[in-house]
Image (cartoon, grey):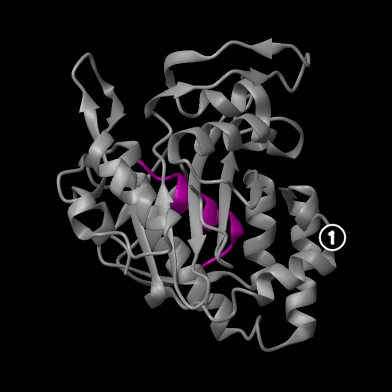
C-alpha cells in the first residue's frame, strides 16, 4: 500500500495545447496531449526528492476515463501511448493513468502550457545555463553557442522542446535536457532569493496562479505559496532525476515499452520513501545517450 508518511507525490504535466495564446507555437491540431510528464516525490523531511520522467511515447495500459469534453466514459485501452491519456480525459485521466502504473496516489498535479511556462521563467528573471556544445534546432527555434547563457522564457521553452539536434534526436534525449534545465531552474530560484523573500515568493505564486492549472488544493496564491515554502529545503544536488525504465518496442522503434521489473523498483522506492536504486535504470534506454552532457 501507499505510505502516508508526510512525503508528497506531485504529477507535473506540460501540455502541448496550441489553442489561444499558444497558437504562435504551431497550428492547433485538435486535442492537446501531455508533451511532458514527471512524477515528483518529495521525501517526508522535504530535504530531498526523486523525479521520474515518463516518456510520452510509452505504450501503457490506459484505464477507462471520463472524457473531459463529452463527459462520456472512454473504455480502457491496451498499448495506448501515455500522452493520449491527457488527450482523452485531461489531467484527471493523466493522474488516473499514472496512479494505475505506479500504485501511488498523487497528492497534487500541476499543469503548464507553452505560454504559461514562458511567463513563469520571465517572472523569475530567466534561467542561467551552461551549454558544453552548440545547440541549433530549427524546430524549437533555439540557437546557442557553447558557453553560459541566461535564457528568457521563449529561449527556455526552446531548450526544453529541443529534440532533433541533441543526443539521438529522440524524446528520451529531450527528457535528459529537460531534467538538466529543471536543476538549473531550482538553482536560479535559490540564487534570486525566491524562498527567502516573501515578496518574491508571493509574486511568483501570483504569476503561477495565472500560468499554471492545478488541483483545487493548490488553486490560490496562499496555497501555492505554502506549497513552495515546503520545498525550500530542496536544492538541485538533492534531487535525483531518472527516466522511467523503458526499452524500444520491437514492433515500432518510435515507441517504448516499460521495463516491468525495473519499473516496479522505481515505484517501490517512491512508495516507501527510499532512494531509487541505480540498478533500476542501468539497462534502460531512457538514461542512455549523450543529451545529458549538453547542459551542465
Q: In this image, 195 relative to 279: left or right?
A: right
Location of residue 19 in the rendering, given as x and y in whole percent from the top left corner: 72, 30
Q: Where, quadrant-wise, is the C terminus in this rendering?
A: bottom left
Location of residue 31 in the rendering, given as x and y in whole percent from the top left corner: 65, 21
Q: In this image, 70 relative to 105: left or right?
A: right
Residue density around tag 1, few if under 14, some if 14–19, many if 20 or more, within 10 Å: some
Q: Residue at x 37, y 77 (%)?
A: 237
Foreground of the two, 290 or 110: 110
Residue lying farthest to the left in this orientation: 283
Foreground of the two, 184 or 239: 239
Q: In this image, 86 relative to 68: left or right?
A: left
* Residue 30 visible in the displayed image: no
Which stretch appears magenta? 151-164
Query: Above or below — where is 110 with respect to 15?
Result: below
Any magenta on residue 281?
Answer: no
Q: Main secondary structure of the magenta part?
A: helix
- Location of mark 1 (residue): 220
* Residue 14 visible in the displayed image: yes
Q: Residue at x 49, y 78 (%)?
A: 47
Location of residue 259 in the rendering, given as x and y in whole percent from the top left corner: 25, 35
Q: Residue at x 58, y 63 (%)?
A: 152
Q: In this image, 31 relative to 35: left or right?
A: right
Helix, strand or loop under label 1? loop
How many numbered callouts?
A: 1
Q: Residue at x 74, y 23 (%)?
A: 68
Query: Above or below — where is 103 with respect to 241?
Result: above
Any magenta on residue 161?
Answer: yes
Foreground of the two, 82 or 127: 82
Amino acid at each position: 500500500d501507499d505510505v502516508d508518511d508526510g512525503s508528497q507525490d506531485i504529477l507535473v504535466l506540460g501540455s502541448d495545447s496550441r489553442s489561444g495564446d499558444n497558437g504562435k507555437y504551431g497550428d492547433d491540431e485538435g486535442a492537446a496531449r501531455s508533451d511532458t510528464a514527471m512524477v515528483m516525490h518529495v521525501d517526508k523531511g522535504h530535504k530531498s526528492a526523486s523525479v521520474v520522467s515518463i516518456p510520452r511515447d510509452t505504450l501503457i495500459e490506459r484505464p477507462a476515463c471520463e472524457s473531459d469534453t463529452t463527459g462520456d466514459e472512454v473504455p480502457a485501452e491496451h498499448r495506448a501511448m501515455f500522452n493520449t491519456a491527457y488527450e482523452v480525459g485531461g489531467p484527471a485521466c493523466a493522474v488516473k493513468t499514472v496512479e494505475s502504473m505506479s500504485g501511488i496516489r498523487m497528492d497534487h498535479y500541476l499543469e503548464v502550457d507553452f505560454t504559461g511556462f514562458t511567463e513563469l521563467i520571465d517572472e523569475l528573471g530567466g534561467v542561467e545555463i551552461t551549454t558544453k556544445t552548440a545547440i541549433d534546432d530549427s524546430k524549437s527555434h533555439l540557437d546557442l553557442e557553447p558557453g553560459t547563457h541566461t535564457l528568457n522564457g521563449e529561449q527556455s521553452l526552446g531548450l526544453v522542446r529541443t529534440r532533433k539536434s541533441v543526443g539521438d534526436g529522440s524524446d528520451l534525449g529531450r527528457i535528459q535536457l529537460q531534467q538538466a534545465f529543471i536543476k538549473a531552474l531550482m538553482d536560479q530560484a535559490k540564487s534570486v532569493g525566491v524562498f527567502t523573500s516573501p515578496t518574491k515568493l508571493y509574486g511568483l505564486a501570483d504569476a503561477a496562479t495565472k500560468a499554471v492549472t492545478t488541483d483545487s488544493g493548490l488553486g490560490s496564491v496562499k496555497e501555492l505559496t505554502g506549497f513552495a515554502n515546503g520545498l525550500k529545503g530542496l536544492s538541485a544536488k538533492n534531487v535525483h532525476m531518472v527516466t522511467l525504465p523503458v526499452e524500444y518496442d520491437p514492433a515500432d522503434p518510435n515507441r517504448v515499452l516499460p521495463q516491468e521489473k525495473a519499473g516496479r523498483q522505481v515505484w517501490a522506492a517512491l512508495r516507501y520513501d527510499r532512494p531509487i536504486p541505480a540498478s533500476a535504470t542501468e539497462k534502460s534506454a531512457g538514461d542512455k545517450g549523450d543529451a545529458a552532457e549538453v547542459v551542465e
